[in-house]
Image (cartoon, rainbow, N blue to C red):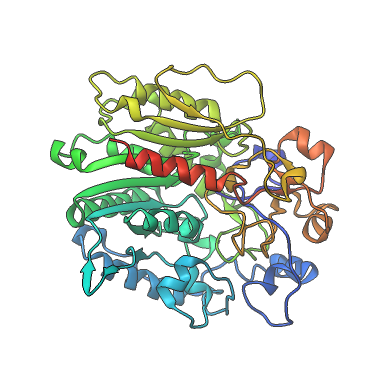
Amino acid sequence: MNSLSRAMIFMGSLFVSGGSLALPHKNVEDCVSINQHVTKAEAVAEKGRYRQTLTITDEFDFSTQGAFSEYIAHQRKKILAENPKAHLPCPITTPISEQLYGERDLKVLDLIAPFQIEPRMQTQGNTEKKHDTRGVLLIHGLTDSPFIFHDLASSFLKQGITVRTLLLPGHGTAPSALVDVSHAQWRAATEYGVQSMLEDFDTVYLGGFSTGGALLIDYLNQQSISLEQKAQIKGLLLWSPASQAKASMAWAAEYVAWFKDYMDESTDSDFAKYESFPFNAAAQIYSLMQRIQPANLTDTPDIPLFVVASDVDQTIETKSTLRLLEHWHNKSMRKTQYKDTLIYYTDKVQKPVLSISINMIEPESCTRGDYCDALIGIAHTALTNAPNNQHYGWEGVYRNCEHVFGTEYYRTCKTTQSPMIGETTAQALQAYPAMQRLTFNPYFDHMVDALARFIASK
């Protein structure tokens, strides 16, 4: 989801991105330098250099149900053709990029493209031990890319689970690609992704961040999925699923989109995520969220839930997410209800009232990292990234200051040596107007441990 700044006056905050410590970098244009030279980035925003696609190419034909390898190849070609940053060198590495590409020099394309990655083969003597037939499909959020799953993917591989990621239509190129996209296209991509998993793996897990979570909920509420297929799916993993927009005026985006393209025009200097945000994107996610309101969830399957949410999320209304969890959890005739798990980030003494049978996990106070003293709430944009992520982590090269773009605080937010980081609540911004929006999860290790237990439980 994306950033709003000037547009907050009109509609409130809707979809924003994250950031952390900026590091000095050589004087070369690459995926690092484009977001570290503030004056240059502001000039780029004014010209819209990274806002428009270079050309328009065909979308993948999901109706053919082609092989996933064909899908990946198509999406890589599309990114190269359309994304004005695709060819930029990108000296950001992750365990996933190392396994996918080895030691070769990376470009932006390599880090934002969809991927499939299998657990490394383990050998015992001369006998090769093959991994089992389990797979997880991960779907990113609005304006994001599969890069946000590089850290999580490593945790699945350690459990012997193959990882696939989707790149939703309108993503991975430039913000202009979202001006005319429809949620029907996202739903078609989701159907393709899930069906390919069910065909290729015996045991399937489905995971989604924000919009990706809403798409999976919507898909699983369809009566067209057979009981046999539903039985293959052993878990629905949701990181701040898009249940209801925090912005009270989100419904208006559909009408504004008729005469104005962008809610906010920014630098788009984050190689892994759009920063400019079209009104149509807000309109499409709003329509999708209406489809998954509890009253419309009439055919939810008996699949256990693993949900991660923050009580101060400024993109999604967390109370709505908890209502959705309750509705799913209390569906009659469920045999896997006992596995439903909620990781809930809050510093409030009073906790939400939920069914006692939901396994609610709260991490202890942040004490392990040197970032703990700077932390003021867990942001929507933080959940899937580890603290050591080279781009989004505590010492990462990108800082999310989109909420103050165009104001006197933007430069301070981007350059200060002692940033405050967290969720951009009204209280936090009043106290720290130049704060950065958090883009990594301080409790990442705790979360992946809980996820491993969820998957291992019978």
Can residue 261 be seen here? The reply is no
- Quadrant containing the C terminus is top left
Q: Quadrant of residue 220?
A: top left
In the rendered structure, the answer to whether residue 12 lies left or right of residue 271 reads right
The answer to which of 171 and 33 lies nearer the viewer is 33
**Residue positioned most to the front:** 125
Asked if 291 appears above or below 295 in the picture, the reply is below
Q: Count of labels shown?
A: 0
Q: Residue at x 30, y 51 (%)?
A: 188
In the rendered structure, the answer to whether residue 410 lies left or right of residue 353 reads right
Q: Residue at x 40, y 59 (%)?
A: 167
Asked if 260 appears above or below 366 in the picture, the reply is below
Asked if 327 appears above or below 341 in the picture, the reply is above
The x, y position of residue 77, in whole percent, is 38, 75
Q: Quadrant of residue 57?
A: bottom left
Can residue 122 be seen here? The reply is yes
The x, y position of residue 98, in whole percent, is 47, 73
In the rendered structure, the answer to whether residue 421 lies left or right of residue 297 reads right
The answer to which of 53 and 64 lies nearer the viewer is 64
Q: Residue at x 60, y 41 (%)?
A: 14
The x, y position of residue 293, in whole percent, is 40, 28
Q: Quadrant of residue 158?
A: bottom left
In the rendered structure, the answer to whether residue 200 lies left or right of residue 351 reads left
The x, y position of residue 363, in whole percent, is 58, 35
